[in-house]
Image (spheres, rainbow, N blue to C red):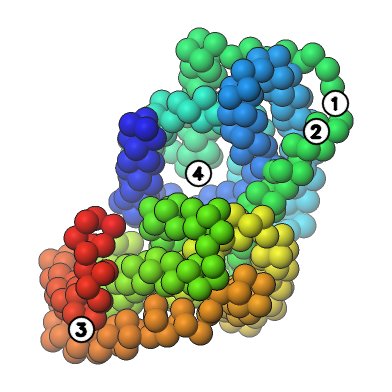
Amino acid sequence: MKEHKFAALLSYVNLGLTNLTGILVTPYVIRSLGNQEYGLYTLIGAFVGYLSVLDLGLNNAIIRYVAQYRVQKDERAQENFLATSLIIYCAIAVLLAVFGALFYFNIDYFFSKSLSVEELHKAKIMLIILVFNIAFTLPGGAFTGICSGYEKFIFPRILSILKVIIRTITLVFILHYGSDSIGVVVLDTIINMVFILVTIWYSFSKLKIKIKLHNWDFSFVKEIFKYSFWIFLFALVYQFQWRTGQVILGSTTNTTIVAVFGVGVMLGVYFTTFGNIINNLLLPKAVQAVYNNASNEVLTDQMIKVGRISYILLIYVFGAFLLTGQDFIKLWIGELYLPAYWIALSIMAVYIIPIAQGYSHAILDAKKMLRFKSLNFLLFSIIGAILGYFLSKQYGMYGMITGLVSAVFLLQVVMNFYYQSKLKLNMPKFFIKALFKFTLAFIIVMLVSYYINQQFTSNTWFVFLIKNGLFSCIFFFTMYFVIDGEERKLISKGL
């Protein structure tokens, strides 16, 4: 149990460190590479990112089956499963090479109108390196899955933290000595290879795993993919949803606009990641109710209880960014990137309620009802990309983000009807009990905070901190009197 708790703590440390270093290092990277070069790096990373979904959810399958065979003490089955998995990964590596070749020979077709000859040359080099990186990383990730299956969570998480630290220090070093975007891609590839090799060493030398193909069973392969398919579909849609905007803008605009859009997406994704941390902390306790055959009324009340706390923290972060996000971006990376504020704000706004409703997703998972949401997630992401493509021709990055977030909004409308009709959750009660009074209080807090902020005429880091400090005091003072006694006790106990 101590291993699980410490591993969970390390996961949050890793996530916080990743986000913090991303925010701190990004301005330096942009200044070192230049806006166009950084945009090119972002564009090719997004373009190749589609290939990363070819893991097909196998990593999760490895965790599940290794854990299962260890409980059953069936070493022979585990050896055969791991051998089967590695054969599948070899096939995936070949598939990656094929798709990489297709991208390579068609990169002129996609970006000839928006990239210069020199940029196209660099793009092709980065593409080759990144395809090799992913081809090595995907099967290498299987060994991290093996560690999790053995319930050895601490070692891979320590490696992840070390990887972030070493990558950040080395990145600053090579940029200081004049490296370009190709150098950054080479650095990432080398670091990935080194840490994967360390994980492989740990798996063989410390966990004493054995890999041996005793027999090839197509029915077993089918069973593996049946389990991993929905996980793969979620990963596919996630990649499609946020990387597509950058790829489309790369073909319709220029690399500078891609860079600005990429920064906005990065900040928006940080927000959604923060929200999902909240759900990871709160949801496991609530999901037990599903397995205990709790009534729909109890499930709705649990959803309200979880949703309130999530919603308060989400609107706090959203409110702070709404008030001072433009100041932050100006101080952080300069006025050229101010449009990123609207990109990030749009993503944050459209995801507040879905994240606050994270409990409903846990119920779907517990009841094995993810199929409807997965398929609709895919459908609306495609609709959003198509709509964004046509809007981007006239409105640039603003048109692109409008298409994407409109699709997310429509998806949530559909899902709320689904929660009401299929899960029998009382969604009107959720909106009234979990959101209504806090939304009214939030509006009042924002009006007061906006008036106070208008009294400041200068924009420095000190003033930025003062503004956020005042907003925080007003926000939490107000919310403390809005929440009920039970919620105060929950907060006082550290959730």
Q: Secondary structure at mark 2?
A: helix
Tell which tag, 3 or 2, sits nearer the viewer: 2
Disc with the residue nearer the chain's start (4 vs 2): 4
Residue 123 percent across, percent down from the top left: 63, 47
Give the CA distance from mark 4 to mark 1: 44 Å
First-in-chain label (3 vs 1): 1
Q: Quadrant of residue 385?
A: bottom right
Query: Of helix, strand and loop, which one carries label 4?
Result: helix
Label of residue 217 in the image? 1
Label 2 CA crowd tier, 10 Å (few <14, some 14–19, many 20+): some
Quickly name the residue at label 3.
449
Q: Disc 3, disc 2: CB below 8 Å?
A: no
Badge 4 crowding class, 10 Å Cα cut-off, few under 14, some 14 to 19, many 20 or more, is many
Distance from Cα at disc 4 to Cα at disc 2: 40 Å
Number of numbered markers: 4
Q: Which mark is residue 181?
A: 4
Q: Nearer the viewer, mark 4 or mark 1?
A: 1
Say what amino acid the circle numbered 3 marks. Ser
User: Looking at the picture, how far across and down is residue 229, in whole percent?
Assistant: 73, 47
SS at circle 1: loop
From the viewer's perspective, is 177 left or right of 258? left
Q: CA distance from mark 3 to mark 1?
A: 64 Å
Which residue is more in the foreground, 50 or 60? 60
User: Who's the residue at 23% across and 84% down the image?
Assistant: 445
Are discs 3 and 4 less than 8 Å apart at CB? no
